[in-house]
C-alpha cells in the first residue's frame, strides 16, 4: 500500500529527500501552503507533517478523511 504524506510548512530539505526516498510514500510538498491549499490537499493525506504555521484544529480534522497521524516538526 502507498501512503500520502502532506507537508504543509517549510521543513529541512534533508527530511524531504529522506521521505521521497521511501518507495511506499507519496510526498506532497510545495513549500508553505496557504490555509485554503492545505484544506484542499488534506482529504487525500494519510499522514501530515506540520510546524507552527499550520493549525491542526477541528476545521482541518473534519476535512482530513484519510488522515491517521499528524507530526509536528521542529
Image (cartoon, rainbow, N blue to C red):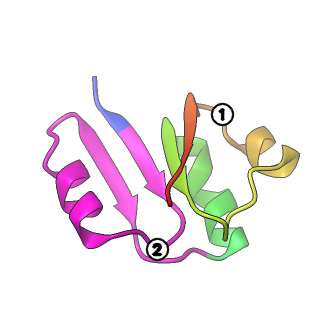
- Residue 18 vs residue 42, the one in the foreground: 18
SS class of the residue under badge 2?
A: loop
Image spot of residue 58 (x, y percent): 86, 44
- Category of crowding for the residue at label 2, using alpha-carbon neighbours closer than 10 angstroms: few (below 14), some (14–19), many (at least 20): some
Pointer 2 residue: 10
Residue found at x 54% / y 64%: 8
Position of residue 46 relative to residue 74, above or below, is above
**Disc on the earlier residue, 2 or 1:** 2
Image spot of residue 54 (x, y percent): 68, 64
Q: Nearer the viewer, mark 2 or mark 1?
A: 2
Image spot of residue 57 (x, y percent): 82, 49
Position of residue 53 relative to residue 26, above or below, is below
Image spot of residue 68 (x, y percent): 56, 28
Residue found at x 84% / y 50%: 59
Number of residue marks: 2
Corner quadrant of residue 63: top right
Residue 15 within the magenta-colored segment of the rendering: yes
Residue 73 within the magenta-colored segment of the rendering: no
Residue found at x 66% / y 33%: 65
SS class of the residue under badge 1?
A: loop
Residue occupying the far top of the picture = 1
Task: Tell me the magenta residue range.
Answer: 4-33
Q: Is residue 5 left or right of residue 42?
A: left
Residue found at x 27% / y 61%: 16
CA distance separating discs 2 and 1 = 23 Å
Pointer 1 residue: 65
The image quadrant where one finds the N terminus is top left
- Category of crowding for the residue at label 1, using alpha-carbon neighbours closer than 10 angstroms: few (below 14), some (14–19), many (at least 20): few
Amino acid at each position: 500500500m502507498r501512503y500520502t504524506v502532506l507537508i504543509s510548512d517549510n521543513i529541512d530539505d534533508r527530511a524531504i529527500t529522506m521521505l521521497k526516498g521511501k518507495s511506499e510514500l507519496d510526498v506532497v510538498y510545495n513549500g508553505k501552503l496557504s490555509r485554503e491549499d492545505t484544506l484542499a490537499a488534506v482529504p487525500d493525506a494519510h499522514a501530515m507533517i506540520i510546524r507552527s504555521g499550520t493549525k491542526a484544529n477541528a476545521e482541518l480534522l473534519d476535512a482530513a478523511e484519510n488522515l491517521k497521524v499528524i507530526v509536528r516538526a521542529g
